Image: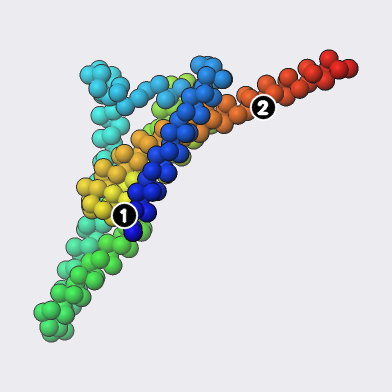
Amino acid sequence: MDFRRRRVQFILFAIGLIALSMTAEKCRELVGQEAASKSGQFTFLNCFDMSSGTLACAVKEGVKLYFYNIRSIHVEKARNVAIEKALHEALVNGMPAKEAAKEVQRAGEKAAKLASRQAKRIIGPIVAAGWDFFEALYFGGTLTEGFLRGSGTMVGAYSGGYVGEQRFGRFGYLVGSTLGNWVGARVGLMVYDVVNGTVEAARRSAGLSSGNQICKL
């Protein structure tokens, strides 16, 4: 039942993403190349051009993974310290081995959750969002484009990291954060183009309406 629900959620998410992508493409055509999002021109395929695109992607992903790894190491260190402390207390109190093992395991899990909650899984996403924000400005985008792309990056990296960690642990967190970051950035850009296209359509509609009124007068 749980698997079926997740599959339905994934299908709905994919349909929504495709619909948003098609709408964004139409809006980009409506507003023209100059007013459309700029940073979206740099795609995942540019990472394989064996030139500046490859270098930019390597540096970008390296920085993000570095901070993701810092967070993972912080959580692991907190778990180990808690386990050592709990084990020492169990030995001092003469606790039975089986009970001591359970107590140590509980202490480690509690410390890991606390450390994770304190870190908020936000170090990497913040760095990624800041990077994408300035990347959008570098490509000639507006502040709004940079903000929406950065926001999408942060939400995607945070969500992807959380889901990946729940399923596959530390490795899942690193991979999920990276994939979520890329998807979130694309969604942010598509939202920007849709909003931009909607405003342009409303402006043209208002201009047409005003023209009709002038003709009637």
Residue sitting at x 26%, y 57%: 75
Relative to 28, 102 lies left or right = left
Q: Position of residue 152 (x, y in %)?
A: 44, 39
Q: Which residue is mark 2?
A: 202
Does the image show residue 150? no
* Quadrant housing the C terminus: top right
Looking at the picture, the colour scheme in use is rainbow
Relative to 2, 191 lies left or right = right
28 lies above or below 17: above
Q: Report crowding for label 2: few under 14, some 14 to 19, many 20 or more residues within 10 A (C-alpha).
A: few
Look at label 2 and name its amino acid. Answer: Ala
Q: Report crowding for label 1: few under 14, some 14 to 19, many 20 or more residues within 10 A (C-alpha).
A: few
Residue sitting at x 19%, y 72%: 104
Does the image show residue 103? yes
Q: Position of residue 176 (x, y in %)?
A: 29, 44
Q: Which residue is mark 1?
A: 3
Between 65 and 3, which is closer to the camera in this rendering?
Answer: 3
Could you give the CA–CA distance between mark 1 and mark 2, rounded to whole angstroms?
A: 43 Å
